[in-house]
Amino acid sequence: MTLERREFLSASLAAAALLTARANAREDKPAKAAKPLSILVFGGTSFIGPAMVPYATARGHKVTLFNRGKTRPELFPELEKLRGDRDPAKGDGLKALEGKKFDVVIDDCGYYPRHVKASAELLAPNAAHYIYVSSISAYADNTTENQDEDAKLAELADPTVETMGAQYENYGGLKVLCERAAEAAFKDRATIVRPGYIVGPGDWTDRFTYWVVRAERGGTMLVPGAATDPLQIIDVRDLGEWMIRLAEQKTLGRFNACGPKERLPWGNVIDTCGRVGGAKDLKVRWVSIDELEKHKDEEPFKSANFSIWAPYVGESKGFHTWKNERGVKAGLTFRTLEDTVRSTLEWWKALPADSRGKQLAGPTAEQEAEMLKKLG
């Protein structure tokens, strides 16, 4: 991660924490759980953590964080914090966890199987339940629509690799191996959660935030694909709160965490971003897959990054169509798209001006203008 990204993330997390505090100050504050749990959270101060931890504590659970203390260490000063490293070969590694007992472990930052194996095996004798956050990228095939949790999983040619690869080509296969490491250690006491794109306040990647912010700016906005293309997202708050409910109910199994409940057309997302942003002069210029293909070798089309959308054809036709029935039956709920868009925009506006200027996804204003000119 570059220095700029680290700075952006730092600012983003501060705003995310403020919004989380506001959310939990509402009148509909979560009721106390029937049975308080002791919960260990790996990380906890990046993106999912600030959306999940306050909900857990509001429910009356005792939360302990295990991390390196490098990302927003000032968050959650009231919680017990154990310092160490996911890599058992670095520094004190997992030493701070030795002999500790927990009702449930939530692992939302396990990326390499060697790390997950070490933590799961260490904790298995003293923890009743392990929830591992994997990814939809764990699946091998995105060409087929409406697949469920039993679809074929990705495999790595070299299962010992500890790099994501130049194009993140190893990410899915590594997640699969992490899942297997957790399940091997906890056997029938493990839960695997496979989210799609996680969005909402605190999302420093800009993948969804780009469209929210761009729509508010108004003018002619270039949007790839067609309004009928499907899109799947999960609000980070819905994901975080659901995982706490999975812990409370000790729900086991494998679940896709993709939303919303019903099919979401890409055009609805763009319309909602425009309506919430309130720009009266916003016009959408849809760019078909055929047009994109025609200009794919030309700049700026070649280097422009159309975030979160995936072509509804060929190798990515099924990418945004994963079934979520198992998750819904297990209590996964979804707030409205308007809530997600509005909260994301409010969070972004609360960031320092220099952070708002660091765009990490989507075409730049200059690229968009040039593409619109070439398209006519």
Image (tube, helix red, strand yellow):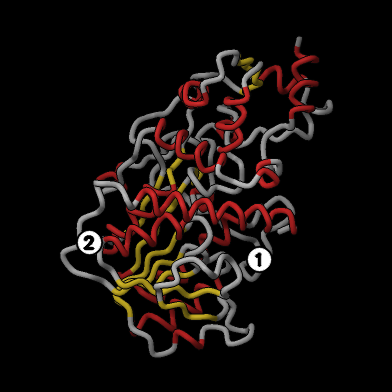
Local packing at callout 2 (Cα closer than 10 Å; few below 14, some 14-19, many 20+) is few
Which residue is situated farthest in the top direction here? 376
Let me know if residue 87 appears in the view: yes
Question: Residue at 58% of width from left, 51% of height from top?
Answer: 12
Horizontal placement of 195 versus 128: left or right?
A: right
Residue 161 image point, x, y percent: 66, 67
- Nearer to me, 362 or 263: 362
Would residue 133 appear left or right of 299 to someone viewing this image?
A: left
Q: Say which residue appears at 40% left-offset and 54% top-offset.
A: 21
In the rendered image, residue 330, in percent from the top left (x then y), is placed at: 26, 50
Q: Is 209 rendered above or below residue 238?
A: above
Q: Amino acid at mark 2?
A: Gln
- For badge 1, the amino acid type reads Asp
Where 183 sits versus 84, above or below? above
Is 29 in front, or is 154? 29
Q: Which mark is residue 158?
A: 1
Q: Earlier in the sequence, mark 2 or mark 1?
A: 1
Residue underneath mark 2: 249
The answer to whether the residues at label 2 and label 1 have Cβ atoms under 8 Å apart is no
User: Which dot, 2 or 1, sits closer to the camera?
Assistant: 2
Q: Quadrant of the N terminus?
A: bottom right
Which residue sits at x=83%, y=26%? Answer: 298
> Which image quadrant is residue 4 in?
bottom right
Which quadrant does the C terminus fall into?
Answer: top right
State the image quarter where residue 99 is shown: bottom left
